[in-house]
């Protein structure tokens, strides 16, 4: 995932924690990420899509943390940027 998309996801997750999902607008997200709202919509179809990508990344980070101490799966998990993919 490119740096701009990562900035958008990070801004979204920050704003949702701070203001809540309903109160966070795509305009707020774009401003916080330092991008134009059109750029946001070129990369994501909706606010919901951004949140789902953010949650997916957090899930993979957690799985990597858990697996790092397990010799059976250590090193075999990585986030591919796509939902529900193992590689």
Image (cartoon, helix red, strand yellow):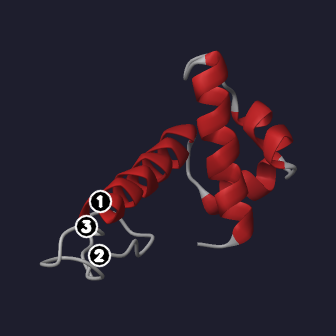
Q: Tell me if residue 6 comes above or below residue 82 in the rendering.
A: above
Q: Which residue in the protein does label 2 denote?
A: 77
**Which of 64 and 44 lies nearest the eye of the viewer?**
64
16 lies left or right of 51:
right
Mark 2 or 3: the one toward you: 3
Q: Residue at x 78, y 31 (%)?
A: 28
Q: Residues within 10 Å of mark 3 (few under 14, many from 20)?
A: few
The answer to whether marks 1 and 3 mark residues whose Cβ atoms lie closer than 8 Å is no
Looking at the rendered structure, the secondary structure element under dot 1 is helix
Q: For residue 32, which quarter of the picture? A: top right
Q: Residues under labels 1 and 3: Cα distance? A: 11 Å
Please state the horizontal and vertical placement of residue 37, each as a whole percent of the image: 80, 46
The tag on residue 63 is 1
Looking at the rendered structure, the secondary structure element under dot 3 is loop
**Which of 85 and 65 lies nearest the eye of the viewer?**
65
87 lies left or right of 16:
left
The answer to whether marks 2 and 1 mark residues whose Cβ atoms lie closer than 8 Å is yes
Q: Residue at x 40, y 71 (%)?
A: 79
Q: Which residue in the protein does label 3 denote?
A: 69
Going from N to C along the chain, the mark reached first, 2 or 3, is: 3
36 lies left or right of 58:
right
Q: Residue at x 54, y 47 (%)?
A: 50
């Amino acid at each position: 995932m490119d740096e701009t998309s990562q900035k958008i996801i990070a801004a979204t997750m920050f704003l949702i924690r701070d203001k809540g999902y309903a109160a966070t607008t795509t305009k707020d997200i774009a401003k916080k990420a330092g991008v134009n709202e059109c750029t946001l919509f070129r990369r994501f179809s909706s606010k919901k899509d951004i949140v789902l990508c953010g949650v997916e990344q957090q899930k993979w980070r957690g799985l990597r943390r858990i697996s790092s101490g397990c010799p059976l799966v250590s090193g075999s998990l990585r986030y591919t940027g796509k939902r529900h993919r193992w590689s």
